[in-house]
Image (cartoon, rainbow, N blue to C red):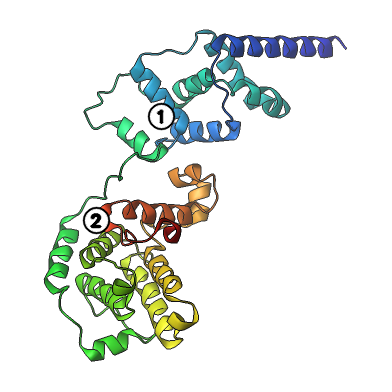
Amino acid sequence: MAIAIIAITIISIVMMGLMIVKSLCNLSVLSLSLSTVRMRVRRRQNGFKCDSGDLVLDYTRRRQAGSRPPTMTTLFLFLVEVVVDRWSMVRYIVISELLCSMALIDFTAFCLAGLPTKRISPGLPSERSQFDGLSKRPLGPPHRKSSLPKHQEVKRRFLEICDTTFSEEVRAALRLPAFDSYEWSDADVIHLMQTMFVELGFIEKFSIPVDTLREWLYEVYKHYNEVPFHNFRHCFCVAQMMYAITRQANLLSRLGDLECLILLVSCICHDLDHPGYNNIYKINARTELAVRYNDISPLENHHCSIAFRVLEHPECNIFKNFSRDTFK
């Protein structure tokens, strides 16, 4: 009985202390899952980068502004770590209330994730740029993926041949499911993709500028990684099969031009920036994408995100002449 009374007294004191700290801080209340905080802390301790953590980004900005969390927070943060490791029941009752304070979230990133305390110059490349790029949607078009010498050579070759037309034999073979893409170079494959849009009449029907289409196809090519399977050749194989089905089953008249355009573009973009590992690995390893998308189809969400980010560049936006309702 005495032990129970002591335990209740301690819990009551802790709860009162938490409410006092929360009142003194007088900051906005945020809804933050404890499991998410601890997952990012463990990732940091295990050597993973925490670039996508919003709490890390917020801490970095506050450090640059010269602000400091309240000193009392340190004591309660230490209590949080002890309680979380020991009492699973209190974890969901007390600690969730504790982490509602912005100051405590700030200090969680600082004390547990082990971030640098040195001020960062806004004009120099640094970890801050990584936080801003991964944790917050940019206000303008995002930074493009860098072109490697191989990419530049492929683009040069593609621009040399993009105004030419394949023979009727090649175009007829392209309409068949058994088309073999591996006898063609990367520049030729991009040209074949352009041919699909031309043959289906999408350039005229949707007022797609040819230069914009070519720039978009190159950006798509550049955003596919050199991984064993989910690479640019795989992208072309899926898109070419969709093109063959569209021609063989006459989907243009059955589904409509817009639906067929969406299908083709989706096939081309469906594995953009694939890292070569599946969702199960990403989730179990607690990687950047798994944390960002809360373990819900992280790769699929990432592919879609990259596709729309590429389209944010005006010179790559093949839908620039769509009406607002059509684009939605």
Foreground tag (1 vs 2): 2
Q: Indicate the quadrant where residue 45 lies.
A: top left
Residue at 38% from the left image edge and 79% from the top image edge: 243
For residue 69, above or below residue 231:
above
Q: Earlier in the sequence, mark 1 or mark 2?
A: 1
The amino acid type found where label 2 is placed reads Glu
Q: Residue at the location (30% across, 34% down)?
A: 129
Distance from the alpha carbon under mark 1 to that under mark 2: 30 Å
Q: Is residue 163 above or below residue 171?
A: above
Secondary element at image label 2: helix
Estimate how packed mark 1 is, as few (under 14), some (14 to 19) or many (20 or more) residues with alpha carbons within 10 Å. many
Residue 317 x/y as whole percent? 30, 58
Percent coordinates x, y for residue 214 in the rendering: 23, 65
Q: Which mark is residue 242?
A: none
- Locate residue 286 relative to residue 83 in the image: left or right: left
Q: Nearer the viewer, residue 75 or 130?
A: 130
Circle 2 sits on which residue? 315
In what element is the residue under mark 1? helix
Please give left or right for residue 167 compared with residue 181 in the image. left
Considering depth in this image, is 310 or 182 the residue closer to the camera? 310
Type of amino acid under label 1: Leu
Can residue 275 be spotted in the picture?
no
Residue at screen point 28% across, 77% down: 198
- Asked if 266 appears above or below 8 in the picture, the reply is below
Estimate the x, y position of residue 312 in percent, counting from the top left. Answer: 32, 51
Name the outermost residue toward the right.
1
Residue 260 appearing in the image? yes
Q: Residue furthest bottom?
A: 169
Residue 289 in the image, given as x and y percentages of width and height: 45, 46
User: Callout 2: few (<14), some (14-19), or many (20+) C-alpha neighbours within 10 Å?
Assistant: some
Q: In the rendering, which numbered label is found on residue 57?
A: 1
